[in-house]
Image (spheres, rainbow, N blue to C red):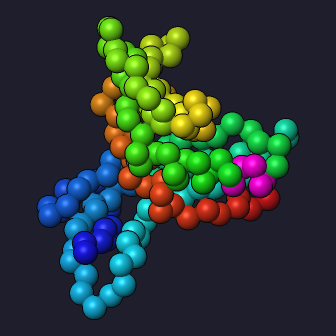
Amino acid sequence: RASRIVAGTAGKWLGGGRFCVFCKAMTVILTRTNMDQRSVSLMAGRFVIKQTKTGTKFDLKAANGEVIASSEVYSSEAACKNGIESVRTNAPKASVEDQTKEGFVTEKNPKFELYKDKAGEYRFRLKARNGQVIATGESYKTKAACENGIDSVKRHAAEADVVKEAE
């Protein structure tokens, strides 16, 4: 079975794998022999749990520290951790509903909704199977950058570590 190993930095194409614009790293496919079946992902994103004035929220951050997606504010840390698990479960299998296209096709949940905000910038939100918004993306100047953000969440959420922000 192949596993993902991240190598390289500074946004350079190293060949033999897939480039992540958010991690500014290369995902290289290597074959593992005489090892267990777990996937290896060095420098994958991470969920950062933090306290706010009104509760607890999480940010999914790329290896370079940039926020890829954020949650709503939850009433407790336990509820926030449930939100993280929902993103881990739903993001990899979610379809993309491009609401910027005229006459777009409505997708079933779970799904990423790609849309333009009032300022004319591109954003996404991830909806769980029950239709609840579980994560929202930052604003992007281009649709391609927003699509890359969705792809990064899909690829990194399932294996991202969970850490608490230092207070």
Q: Where is residue 155 in the image (x, y as percent from the top left)?
A: 38, 52
Most foreground residue, 79 or 45: 79
Camera sees residue 156: yes
Q: Does the magenta stretch include residue 28?
A: no
Relative height, residue 36 to residue 47 (above, below): below
Q: How many marks?
A: 0
Q: Where is residue 124 in the image (x, y as percent from the top left)?
A: 47, 29
Q: Give the range drawn in magenta.
A: 77-81
Indicate the quadrant where residue 27 lies: bottom left
Q: Which residue is drawn at 44% across and 20% down?
A: 115
Camera sees residue 133: no
Q: Residue at x 22, y 68 (%)?
A: 29
Relative height, residue 34 to residue 96 (above, below): below
Q: Which residue is drawn at 65% across and 63% down?
A: 163
Indicate the quadrant where residue 112 lies: top left
Judge from the rendering whether residue 29 lies leftward or rightward of residue 106; answer left or right. left
Q: Where is residue 128 in the image (x, y as percent from the top left)?
A: 55, 38
Q: Which residue is drawn at 83% across and 43% down?
A: 75
Most foreground residue, 17 or 96: 96
Judge from the rendering whether residue 104 lies leftward or rightward of residue 91; answer left or right. left
Query: If the image is split into quadrants, where does the N terminus sit?
Result: bottom left
Query: If the image is split into quadrants, where does the C terminus sit?
Result: bottom right
Judge from the rendering whether residue 51 lies leftward or rightward of residue 148; answer left or right. right
Most foreground residue, 90 or 10: 90
Secondary structure mostly seen in magenta is helix
Q: Position of residue 9 (x, y in %)?
A: 32, 62
In the rendered image, the residue lying farthest to the left is: 15
